[in-house]
Image: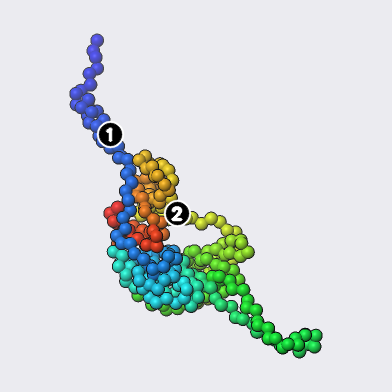
């Protein structure tokens, strides 16, 4: 009776195969801290904010609202009690230019996009002073006013941030045009997009304690269309950016994260996570502060804007880490 004997080379090959499988196990993802390349103020006031960001190959564009006289990324002179702004900085956080947007009252800037010519279109809202109507004198004999007291006209109720504002800014930071649409509600524009010569603005309307969504069109020729309301729905609060086949996402973490066994935060902490196309966690960072803007620009990297105690941080993740 003969016994089957495997050749030694086969056994040796199996050993190599076993070894290669063992060494091919993907190491566990470890979380590291996001470290800004620069931390600075906007205008120096506690109410300053960054609402949106965009970018070019050479610069990072910030849009938001400031309440101070200037001194950080927003150096231009104040227009009112609060101003919208657009500011450009380089990848090291150095100030390139900035422009305040608005009136002498309260203004905010909330979203930005670019057209095919490179111009920036910034949308926001303003509080306006409604005209005071002077009453027409009445000759009716039934009106009794023996003392001849002059009755002051009653000013109409002022609605905060009821005007939708739209500004066109050149690539060099010069205001080229501005447009507005008055509404009877408080408005908060949240997104702006351009397709050809058509602009679409979306956001929220607040009236009598109720919040609804709105969409309003605008043509680059300078005309607003009809504002359309719709039921309100929650807007996403987490940021995300697509980088090739991966997606970076920000979130507030209060406990363990799948794929990150070593993460056990002692308090709720903002984190930045990268997922592959298949949904596998491939990178993780924790953030000291609040993430305000996240964008991928291939010439710069992953751009992250954060805020902590009225200080704003710029972090760049290397393009090679995208």
The image's colouring method is: rainbow
As drawn, 263 above or below 33: above
As drawn, 241 above or below 216: above
Residue at the spot 47% in from the left edge and 73% down from the top edge? 81
Q: Which residue is mark 2?
A: 238
Q: Residue furthest left?
A: 8
Residue at the spot 29% in from the left edge and 60% down from the top edge? 37
Please tell me which residue lies in front, 62 or 246: 62
Where residue 1 sits: x, y (%)? 24, 10
Quadrant in which residue 12 is drawn: top left
User: For the residue carrying disc 2, how many other residues have a C-alpha within 10 Å: few (<14), some (14-19), or many (20+)?
Assistant: some
Residue at the spot 54% in from the left edge and 70% down from the top edge? 161
Residue at the spot 30% in from the left edge and 40% down from the top edge? 27
**Is 134 positioned to the left or the right of 19 in the image?**
right
Please tell me which residue lies in front, 322 or 62: 62
Residue 32 shows in this picture = yes
Question: Helix, strand, or loop for circle 2?
Answer: loop
Q: Which residue is mark 1?
A: 21
User: For the residue carrying disc 1, how many other residues have a C-alpha within 10 Å: few (<14), some (14-19), or many (20+)?
Assistant: few
* Real-space CA distance between mark 1 and mark 2, rounded to the nearest whole angstrom: 37 Å
């Amino acid at each position: 009776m003969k016994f089957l004997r495997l050749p030694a080379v086969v056994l040796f090959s199996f050993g190599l195969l076993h070894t290669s499988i063992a060494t091919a196990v993907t190491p566990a993802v470890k979380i590291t801290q996001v470290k800004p390349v620069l931390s600075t103020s906007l205008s120096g006031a506690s109410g300053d904010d960054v609402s949106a960001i965009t970018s070019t190959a050479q610069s990072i564009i910030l849009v938001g609202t400031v309440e101070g006289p200037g001194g950080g990324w927003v150096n231009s002179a104040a227009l009112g009690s609060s101003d919208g702004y657009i500011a450009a900085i380089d990848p090291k956080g150095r100030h390139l230019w900035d422009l305040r947007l608005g009136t002498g009252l309260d203004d905010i800037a909330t979203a930005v996009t670019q057209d095919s010519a490179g111009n920036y279109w910034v949308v926001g809202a303003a509080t306006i002073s409604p005209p005071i109507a002077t009453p027409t004198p009445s000759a009716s004999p039934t009106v009794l006013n023996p003392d001849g007291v002059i009755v002051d006209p009653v000013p109409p109720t002022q609605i905060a941030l009821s005007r939708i504002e739209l500004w066109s800014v050149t690539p060099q930071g010069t205001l080229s045009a501005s447009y507005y649409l008055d509404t009877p509600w408080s408005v908060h524009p949240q997104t702006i997009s351009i397709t050809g010569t058509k602009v679409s603005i979306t956001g929220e309307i607040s009236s009598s304690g109720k919040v609804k969504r709105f969409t309003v069109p605008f043509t680059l020729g300078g005309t607003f269309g009809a504002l359309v309301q719709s039921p309100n729905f929650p807007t996403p609060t987490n940021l995300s950016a697509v980088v090739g086949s991966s997606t970076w996402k920000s979130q507030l973490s209060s406990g363990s994260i799948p794929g990150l066994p070593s993460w056990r935060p002692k308090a709720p902490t903002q984190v930045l996570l990268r997922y592959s196309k298949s949904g596998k966690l491939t990178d993780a960072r924790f953030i000291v502060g609040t993430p305000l803007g996240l964008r991928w620009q291939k010439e710069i990297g992953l751009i992250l804007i954060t805020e902590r105690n009225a200080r704003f941080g710029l972090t760049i993740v290397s393009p090679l880490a995208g």
